[in-house]
Amino acid sequence: MIQITDLEKFYKTEEVQTIALNKLSFGVKEGEFVAIMGPSGCGKSTLLNILGLLDDPDGGSFMFNGEEVAGYNERKRSELRKHNIGFVFQSFNLIDELTVFENVELPLIYTGVKPAERKKKVEEVLEKMQIMHRRNHFPQQLSGGQQQRVAVARAVVNNPKLILADEPTGNLDSVNGNEVMDLLIDLNEAGTTIIMVTHSEHDAKYSHRIIRMLDGQKVTENILA
Amino acid sequence: MLKNYFKIAFRNLLKNKGFSFINIFGLSIGVAACILISIYILHESSYDQHVSNSENVYRLNRDYIDGERVDAGIHFSANTAPTLLTDFEEVELSGRLMSNGLFWGAGSNEIRFDGEVTQHYEEGFAYADQSIIDIMDIVMVNGEAKTALSTPNTIVISEAIAKKYFKNQNPIGRSMYLNGNNERPFKITGVFKDFKSNSHLDFNSFITLEGEEFGEGEQTRWFQNNYFTYIVLKAGIDVSSFENKMNSTLMEKYIKPSYKLAGFAGWEQAHEREKMYLQPLTDINLYSTHVNYESSFRNDIKVIWIFGIVALFILIIASINFVNLSTAKSASRAKEVGLRKVVGSSRTQLISQFLAESILISFIAFILGIALSAISMPLFRTMSGIDLILPWSSIGFISIVLTSSVIVGVLAGLYPSFYLSNFNPINVLKGKLTSGVKSGGLRSSLVVFQFTVSIILIVGTLIVNQQMNFILNSKVGFEKDQVVQIHSTNVLNDRLETFKEELKKIQGVGNVTISDYLPIEGTKRNGNSFVNEGKEGIDETTPGQAWIIDEDYIETMGMNIVEGRNFIKDRVSDEQSVIMNQAMVKALRLKEPLGKRVSRYGQLYEIIGVVEDFNFDTMKTSVRPLCFFRGTSPTITSVKMNTRDLSAVLVSLEAKWKEFVPNMAFRYEFMDASFAKMYDSVSRIKVIFTAFAILAILVACLGLLALSAYMVEQRNKEMSIRKVLGASVQTIFKLLTKNFLILILVALTVAIPIAYYLMHTWLQDYEYRIEMSWTVFVFAGIAVIVIALCTISYHAIRSAIINPAKVLRSE
């Protein structure tokens, strides 16, 4: 599903150029659950942003579903993203001014789903995430675990082929964290590909494969399942 | 999609109440100002458009060219209008109108109806041809429009007059007597619909010109110019070629021969000195400031432009608030932008979202603005002196307002939406963009622009006010205070002298004079020609006023004789004498005027005195040549009082009047009030200008208040750390206000030269004008700095005295 080859990314300030990704290569198959680990500043988040088509690589190749997407313009990337990729963030990133229902509904609006269809889909996914009873609340009125469940609901409502999770349990206690991981496992078992960046060895164990990174390069790769 | 946009827009409005208030309220003030001014402008530019066929109706104007100087006149001889109709096939209709109070019956009259004894005072009388009814599309509510003025001694009255005196009775066929002349009844043949407020004509009654002749030969002479002349051209006539033809034909065929016959010097060159042209009817209200002796106040297209620009600037200032606040508080929207991008929103969609939001705000502001303008309409009516109304029912009005709200929404929202939609989702989601510091440069420029406009408006307001006060209070060459004009004293006839002597005996009365010629606009004026003795037919004549006064006039008016002497009562030789003003002496090029003689229409007068120039027109023009002749001009008696207790004197004056004329009301006016009335329209414009300048500054300050709130909020952490490290409250206050003060100083630097240039240009319109003083600019500068400082201080002080621990803990 994903094949990156010699992927490069630099960050420039006025005088210093930092290498975030240094000729990184690996592939992810459809239905896989991959965890990416490494110390702060090793390039994990940069990688995730590129994989999520939020950012552009400076070099190398990025094949997504057999299509070269490195060098796509913003419009094309956004088109590809909204149909194929869902995001889960450490800090949940829900829109404070929208209710739970409306937050989850948002991706459907941008993919042009009809209102009746939207309502059905959102309710389905909220039911699945066991957050239906909170549908008319605003994010500030929810606990951290509940907020992350909403965020996961939002990420999956469009049935994306790929979910990118950036430390999804980082802001949660262990009980809520495990619940979220269970949700991800369920999704993966239903066929969704998941790439997760994490600091937590515990969370990483849920995955099929762990890629460890340092200074923008892949160091080791452990296959768990 | 749109629903989602508006939903989040609404919730954002509610979440940031202060911000929303300033945005919406500021914009609605701008909208209200725009609506009011637009209605005013529409009213002023809609003059006479209701006249059917108005595009073919013209008033005849004439430029008198004397070297550099061009005077525009609108008075023509009695035979001009009929000749235009007979000699030119291009002309469909022509008509004359005469409202000069110099002629009995025109202007104001004491009127009495048949079968009644009481006299009533009424103004607004004019003589008119029957054709004026057709040309001006005057609507008759009673009587025959086609024939109302076609027979001698007929009169048509307005609906207002008819209602006032006849209530529900039919006035048609009744007779009206003017000024106690019982020999000459005027038969009322029609009642016409009152003139609209946007008609350049404003008369209450028209007396027919049929069969009238004001002095022998008046109807046939080509140089006795008393009539406004209107024509209707046939459709499709080329105006400028018609004007050429008209000038050459009238000149060669009629005017020159007539001048030659009268022995006017230089008659051969008359075509170089007089140029006739047509002024479109619909241009009269806004394009006649150059014309002398208009029948009533005419607005100025320049005023319309200035008002329009001020209104637009208020709206721009309010829109700038919107742009500034939106970008300044962008941080709070950053996360939303990032997220929407992550879940698939394209940039276009985000731009549409923010535009929708700004259109929503603009729409709410427009609704509120309409409400505000409706609320302030009564006040604006008083300020403008015009019965303006909001055209609620007009589809045009509603659609223009709606369209404008969208346009303003888009224009004001364009930059913020591009700015906000450009956020990089990775950065904002990581919280890298914590504040709206970005685009500070643009924001600063916009603040500078707002304050530049505000400063120009402050300076403008101050100078306009100074100039008006200068005119109203400066020495005008006569003393207008404590002078009462008693009107209609002509009814006293041969008892007038006795009345005058009786008045002089009243305690508190200093002096009394009888003359209709007063240095106040709207009183009697005339046009005469003068030439030095022995130069008749050789030198060109000098046009000038010939005022009839008595021997008490100069003293009563507080005028100053600079050479020679005043008229002496009962001295027979003074009837052949003249006292002239300095302008006349100069115009006649007299070195030693006393004892010289001057000719007026063949009569010689000896110059016995020279009076210091005094203003008898508005101060816009220089003093024109004028001569005093001794005689009786009986309609107005002016009383100079030498006491402060004016009311007691007034009581005695009225008692004396009742003694002489028991059946007529005592009607008086204070001269200083009449003088102020000359500048009434100008004063109104001053008031409107001042009000809107204050509004502009208010809106700019609202924006500054909100902007400073965000700036301060952004620097809260910095200030707290500084405080922890030992900065005093004053230092912090200084730090926070410094940047804004710099912006205002920049605005001052930009504004002062512009304001100076604009006001300098405006003052050139006035012959008598103030010198612009640097203090005005200093005052405006200090005022803006103080206002801005007060505005900013609210937040700066709050930030400076806040407990730093609180701020740092929440970081």
Image (cartoon, helix red, strand yellow):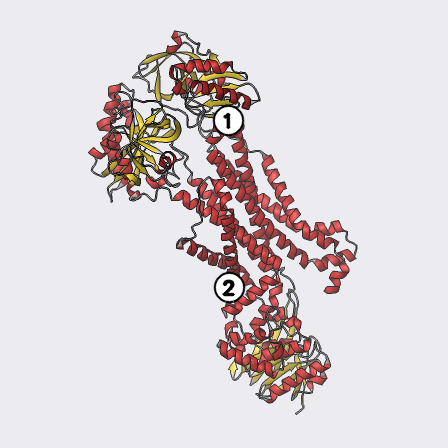
Q: Residue at x 64, y 53 (%)?
A: B708
Crowd class of label 2 (few under 14; some 14 to 19; many from 20; radius 10 Å): many
Circle 2 SS class: helix
Instruction: Residue A27: give x, y in percent of width and height.
Output: 59, 85
Q: Residue at x 59, y 36 (%)?
A: B776
What is the spatial separation of the Cα atoms under label 1 and label 2, in whole angstroms? 57 Å
Which quadrant would residue A176 be assigned to in this image? Answer: bottom right
Is disc 2 on the same chain as disc 1?
A: yes
Residue B162 lies in what quarter of the image?
A: top left
Quadrant of the image occupied by residue B41: top left
Residue B356: mark:
2
**Image coords of residue A148 (percent x, y):** 65, 77
In the rendered view, would you say B217 is above or below B596? below
The subunit letter for the residue under badge 1 reads: B
Q: Label 1, secondary structure: give it.
A: helix
Q: In the figure, B704 relative to A150: above or below?
A: above
**Residue B714 screen position, x and y as percent:** 67, 59
Residue lying furthest bottom: A225
Quarter of the picture holding the C terminus of chain B = bottom right
Mark 2 belongs to which subunit? B
Most foreground residue, B275 or B457: B457
Number of numbered labels in the structure image: 2
Side (left or right) of B400 relative to B233: right
Label 1 or label 2, whichever comes before in sequence order? 2
Question: Compared with residue B313, is residue B350 higher up or lower down, i.e. above or below?
Answer: below
Q: Residues within 10 Å of mark 1 (few under 14, many from 20)?
A: some
Decide: is B357 above or below B457. Answer: below
Q: Is residue A55 visible?
A: no
Q: In this view of the protein, which residue sits in the foreground, A13 or A92?
A: A92
Residue marked by disc 1: B672
Mark 1 belongs to which amino acid? Asp
